[in-house]
Image (cartoon, rainbow, N blue to C red):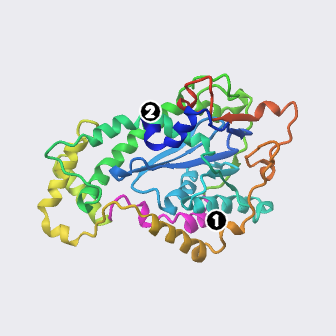
Amino acid sequence: DYMHQYEPELVKQHLHRCLKHCCFWAAGINNMLCVDQYDKLKYLGLALHTGIDPMSGKLKWLKVWFTINSMQIYCSSCSLALCFIDIPLITQSDPRPKNFCLAKGHSYIRQSLDPNLQGLLQHRYMKDKNNIPPEIVWSNIRRNLTPGLENILANLQPHMDYSPQNSLQYNVFKWVVIPWFQRQLDDYVELCNSTKQQAQKNKILPHGPPDDIDEHPDSYGVLDFKVIIDPDASYIQEAEQLYAPPDHPIFDLVPAEFDYWANNYFQQIGSPEINHDTVWDVYVQMLQKFRNNSHLLTTLELHGFHNDRDDFVKEVQDALNVQIGNQIQDMELLLFDEEGLYIGGVQGGLGPDIDEDLADGVVQFSSDDANSENDSGSNN
């Protein structure tokens, strides 16, 4: 049903056996980080974004927020990277404007560490759905996680009233639902990263729990290309201020004044646990608390959900031309070995020199497995 609804052309190609065979190569863990967004929950006013290491299959993050059209949200992966002491060689995404600042932010950090990379974009744009690993993540989520959550969120009783376009309802919904939704995603990530994936004979991938592969690559014969960083270094702070300033409003779940009153009202209703059974009950009680304070509603500046594509494109253009300075196009793209089809970040994109000792560390990652129904059901 999902493919028929969202990818009818691919279904048609599949029926006519016209799907293209796509290969995805990775030299080791932390060679690249594949990022993508999921917009199929926009009807609820929600959006997801993720980052995955294609070699280990480890989900670096899986976040829910109220927009996918903000450059700061996607550059916030730089902020997420600050939670660790290492970063990958390159990042990778679809060729969309929302990923411009991610590309610039990661390139800024890499160039600060290695002067030889000056002027060389440390990000790869993949066309025609060739950013394969996140697509498999979304397929898994669509199959194993979001249907249950969507059923809960779509199960409105007659006395319940919710529309993402209604500013009050939407902000109450965000305040109640997004933290709860994120906890479900966190549990899902922990489960995926700690579970040994089903082996597939047509994929030459290390077989083990992604967390274990990431922590002990030598035990799996896998190379590790991580770049060690100092989270307190000036270049990290500069990258964050340029491309993901912490005080940007996009990082606020709701306006500060609304959050103050929401916390107050939440305590008044007894601070109930928000779970699958109570999420809508808490929403209704919170909404009624705000409605009872009609004077407060006249002072709050609230906005409902809207498809802010045009605003977002202008935001990116302004940032690239004014705040950041040079355009993405002004930076030289990663080198690409047409013959070997290597698309990682080793040796400026040409890949490692293959020899007998290194050959086992180079992995082919393919998206279409004619002999296995589990191709889209695995993180690897």
Is residue 247 visible in the rendered image? The answer is no
For disc 2, the marked residue is 143
Circle 2 SS class: helix
For disc 1, the marked residue is 234
- The residue located at (62%, 37%) in the rendering is 19
Kind of residue sitting beneath label 1: Ser
How many residues crowd mark 1 within 10 Å: few (<14), some (14–19), many (20+)?
Answer: few
Q: Position of residue 328 (x, y in %)?
A: 66, 66
Is residue 221 visible in the rendered image? The answer is yes
Q: Residue furthest front?
A: 16
Q: Position of residue 131 (x, y in %)?
A: 62, 45
Q: Residue furthest left?
A: 292
Disc assigned to residue 318: none
Q: Quadrant of the C terminus?
A: top right
Of the residues under marks 1 and 2, which one precedes in the sequence? 2
Q: Which residues are magenta?
A: 232-255
Q: Position of residue 26 (x, y in %)?
A: 71, 40
Kind of residue sitting beneath label 2: Arg
Q: Quadrant of the N terminus?
A: top left
Decide: is 356 above or below 108.
above
